[in-house]
Amino acid sequence: MQSETMPSDDDAQTQDKLTQAQLTAIENEIKSSQPLTSQLLPISALLHQYSTTAANEQQQSAGFIQSAQFLSTKYTSLRRVRGDGNCYYRAFLYSLCEHLLLRNSNNNETGGLKEFSRIKTTIVNSLKWVCQFGYEEMTIDMFYEELVELFDFIETSLSAADNNDKSASTSAGAAEDESNRNNAQQQLHAKLNEENSTSDYCTWYLRVLTAAQMKSNPDRFLPFLLADETNMMMDIPTFCSREVEPMGKECGMVTVAALAECLGVKVVIEYMDGRLSNNDNDAAVGGIDIGRSGEVVNHVFGQIHDENDEDRDRICLTLLYRPGHYDILY
C-alpha cells in the first residue's frame, strides 16, 4: 500500500502564489471593466440588462424584468457602483456628496445649507467620538482627514455657487453659473473615481463610523444579529471586527441602519430580488410582501417619525439593491 505524499512547503507556497495571482487577475479585470461609480445611465439600462439574458436563464430573469419595468415608472436614471464588496458604502458616499452639492448649488435655501452644515459638523467631530470605541487616532486620522477634505471641497464649491448666484442677473451670468455647477459635479465624479484614493479612504472611514454607531448602542443593534443565524453567536465588537471594518465585506440591514442613523440621513432601498408576481393581487413569499405585478418593495432606514420643520430638510438617499449589490437610483 502506497503512502500518500504530503505536499511540500514549496508546493504549498507555489499554490498560494497561483491563488493570489488568480485573485489579482480577477481584481484587475473588475477594475478595468467597472469604474468605482459610473456615469449617469437611463433607467432603461436596467431592463436592457435582463432582457438580453440568454434563453436558458430567462425564467430566472423574468422576475427581474418585471421589477425593472416597475422601477422605470418611478425613476429616470441610475448610477452603477463597482461590485467589490464595498458597493453600499461607496454608493452611500457618492449619493450623499452629490445630493449635498447639487441640492445647495441648485437651490440655495436655508434648510439645505443647514443640512450640509449639520452633516459636516457631525463628520468633523467624529474623530474623538469614534476613538471612544477602541480606535486609535493615529491609525484612523488619515482616513478621517480624507473625508473632511472631501466636504471642504463641497463647501468651497457651494461658496463659489453662492457668489455666482448673487451676480447671475444676466443670461450670460446664468450660463456661467450653470457651467460652474456642472464643473463642480464633474470634479466630484473624478475625485470619487480615483483608484486607491479618496473613495476608498472615505469608504473605510464610513465603515468605522458604522461600527462606532453599533458599539455606541449595542442594545439597539444586537437584535439584528440575533435574528440572523450566521451572526447570532457574535457580540457587537466581534461582528464589527469581522463584518464591518474589513474592506470588501458586504453590507447587511444592520449596517445600513447604523450608518444612516450615525449621519442622520434617510436611506430608501428598493429591493429588486427577482421574485416573480403572477397576478395583480398582493403576493407574499416567505412572509415578505412582494407587491403587485412586479412591484418592488422598498425599506426605509434612518427614518424620522416625528418630522418637524428641521427634520423635513434631512437628506434622503435612494439606492437599488439586487442580491449582493447596491447601485444609486435617481
Image (cartoon, rainbow, N blue to C red):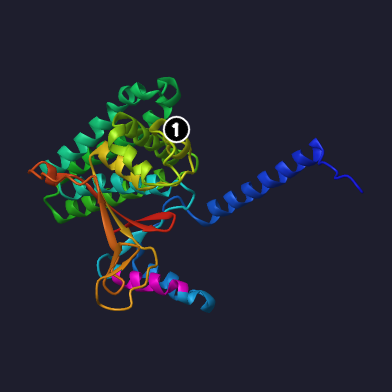
Residue 138 horizontal/vertical position (percent): 43, 20
Judge from the rendering whether residue 40 lies leftward or rightward of residue 180; answer left or right: right
Residue 67 drawn in magenta? yes
Question: In the rendered view of the protein, which quadrant contains the C terminus?
Answer: bottom left
**Which residue is label 1 attached to?**
238
Task: Residue at 76%, 42% (x, y): give it.
Answer: 14
Residue 58 horizontal/vertical position (percent): 47, 76
In the image, 266 versus 273, the foreground residue is 273
**Dot 1: what SS?**
helix
Residue type beneath disc 1: Thr
Characterize the local packing of mark 1: few (<14), some (14-19) or many (20 or more) Cα atoms within 10 angstroms: few
Above or below, 123 against 300 in this view is: above
The reply to whether residue 160 is in sight is yes
In the image, 279 versus 175, the foreground residue is 279
* Secondary structure character of the magenta stretch overall: helix
Residue 305 horizontal/vertical position (percent): 14, 46
In the image, 196 versus 225, the foreground residue is 225
Judge from the rendering whether residue 147 lies leftward or rightward of residue 165; answer left or right: right
Task: Residue at 37%, 34% (x, y): give it.
Answer: 211
Judge from the rendering whether residue 321 lies leftward or rightward of residue 174; answer left or right: right
The reply to whether residue 40 is in sight is no
Task: Residue at 53%, 51% (x, y): give it.
Answer: 31
Segment colored magenta: 60-70
Count of marks overlaid on the render: 1
Residue 48 drawn in magenta? no
In the picture as drawn, the residue positioned furthest to the front comes out as 1
- Tell me the quarter of the picture where residue 96 sits: top left
Judge from the rendering whether residue 238 lies leftward or rightward of residue 257; answer left or right: right
- Tell me the quarter of the picture where residue 287 sits: bottom left
Above or below, 42 against 152 in this view is: below
In the picture as drawn, the residue positioned furthest to the right comes out as 1
